[in-house]
Amino acid sequence: MKAAIRVFSVHGFDGAKMENIAKEAGIGKGTVYEYFESKEQLFEEIMKFSIEKFRQGLKDSIDQGDTIEGKIVNCSRFNAEFLSSHMDLVQIAMKVKLLSKEVRVHHLATQVAIMEHYTEMVRVAKEKGEFSPDLDEELATYCIMGTLDQFCKQRVFFDPRPLGEIDHQAIVSLMLKGLR
């Protein structure tokens, strides 16, 4: 899959050939077909793997924070690092027109799981007194998810700068000021 990502990155989805993927992986073309019926199936498996990797990494980021502020800063950093290290794959995925129903269902299920991670984070923060007890958990979850998603995409794709220069604390402080 790593070899396929490199080939897709260089040639795009349409220009990538299974022969090139096999060569990049150091295996025979027939070996690739033993695991994947087509380039489309290989790409979809890469997408499913990457989406799950993001979900698990995000959950780990939340789990490593002690406070709501620490958790959200961790999520912001993880989001930016993931986007930066998977930029080619994200750009290719945005160009691919059709994904199978299975991949779309998997992506939707993963998005639901990601939302549940954020919602649980907000719920725990309310229980710990970090948020007002009357805070709308669903609305807070959408605010956090949307803000981090847009902030990180802007910094990685449209206003690129070294990851160390991204001020995650500033966006989190501003967001928390509004949520509190």
Image (cartoon, helix red, strand yellow):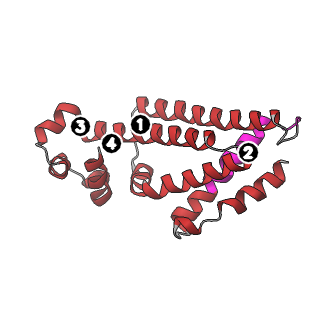
Mark 4 closeness class: few <14, some 14–19, many ≥20 residues within 10 Å: many
How many numbered marks does the figure carry?
A: 4
Report helix, strand or loop for mark 4.
helix
Q: Amino acid at mark 2?
A: Ile
**Residue at x-position 83% and y-position 54%:** 177
Q: Are marks 3 and 2 in contact (CB under 8 Å)?
A: no
**Alpha-carbon distance for marks 4 and 2?**
36 Å
Which residue lies under the disc numbered 2? 68
Which of the two discs, 4 and 2, labels the residue nearer the N terminus? 4
**Alpha-carbon distance for marks 1 and 2?**
29 Å
Q: Are marks 1 and 3 in contact (CB under 8 Å)?
A: no
- What residue span does the magenta drawing correspond to? 133-150
Mark 3 closeness class: few <14, some 14–19, many ≥20 residues within 10 Å: some
**Residue at x-position 36% and y-position 38%:** 44
Q: Amino acid at mark 1?
A: Lys
Query: Which corner quadrant of the image does residue 47 belong to?
Result: top left
Q: Are marks 4 and 3 in contact (CB under 8 Å)?
A: no
Q: Find residue 129 and report its horizontal and vertical position in percent.
A: 85, 38
Does residue 41 sit above or below 144 in this rendering?
Answer: above
The disc label shown at residue 48, or none = 1
The disc label shown at residue 171, or none = none
Q: Nearer the viewer, mark 4 or mark 2?
A: 2
Which residue lies under the disc numbered 3? 38
Which residue lies under the disc numbered 4? 43
**Alpha-carbon distance for marks 4 and 3?**
9 Å
Q: Are marks 1 and 2 in contact (CB under 8 Å)?
A: no
Q: Amino acid at mark 4?
A: Phe
